[in-house]
Image (spheres, rainbow, N blue to C red):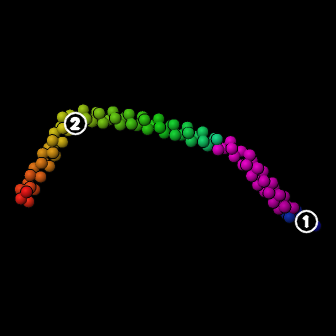
Amino acid sequence: MTTNDESKFSYLLVGLGLGAIGGLMAALLARKETRELLRERSINGLDYLNQQAGKLRESAEVIVKKGKEFIGPHCDSVKTDTEGQKQSYQEERREHLGG
């Protein structure tokens, strides 16, 4: 004779077993649809990221252009100053090395 608690436990085990089997069957049948859904979502995600990167690139170009306008001709003088410093350093080095 089984008691009430033992029958509840056996029903629980039977229910868990049937649920596991049903879950595995559903997963096997829906595997192709799941892959297609994931593929579609990843493609949509990549498209969204590419759009956002394009917008970011455009805004960065605008910021760089405004920065160059703000700095003005001083930017070119910095380049010439560094080139002049390089030349003077090389001349001093030649003089000290005797070459």
Q: Is residue 12 visible?
A: no
Mark 2 belongs to which amino acid? Ile
SS of the residue at dot 2?
helix
15 to 48, vertically: above or below: below
Query: Which of the marked residues, 1 or 2, is nearer the chain's N terminus?
Result: 1
SS of the residue at dot 1?
loop
Q: Position of residue 67 (x, y in %)?
A: 27, 36
From the image, tell me which residue sits under label 1.
2
Q: Position of residue 27 (x, y in %)?
A: 72, 49
Q: Position of residue 60 (x, y in %)?
A: 35, 37
What's the residue at 64%, 41% (across, down)?
Answer: 36
What's the residue at 10%, 56% (across, down)?
Answer: 93
Quadrant of the snapshot with the C terminus: bottom left
Is residue 14 located in the magenta-colored stretch of the structure? yes
Left or right: residue 38 versus residue 74 is: right
Q: Nearer the viewer, residue 98 or 28?
A: 98
Q: Which residues are magenta?
A: 7-35
From the image, tell me which residue sits under label 2.
71
Q: Can you name the residue that lies furthest to the bottom here?
A: 1
What's the residue at 47%, 37% (across, down)?
Answer: 50
Left or right: residue 39 versus residue 14 is: left
Left or right: residue 78 versus residue 96 is: right
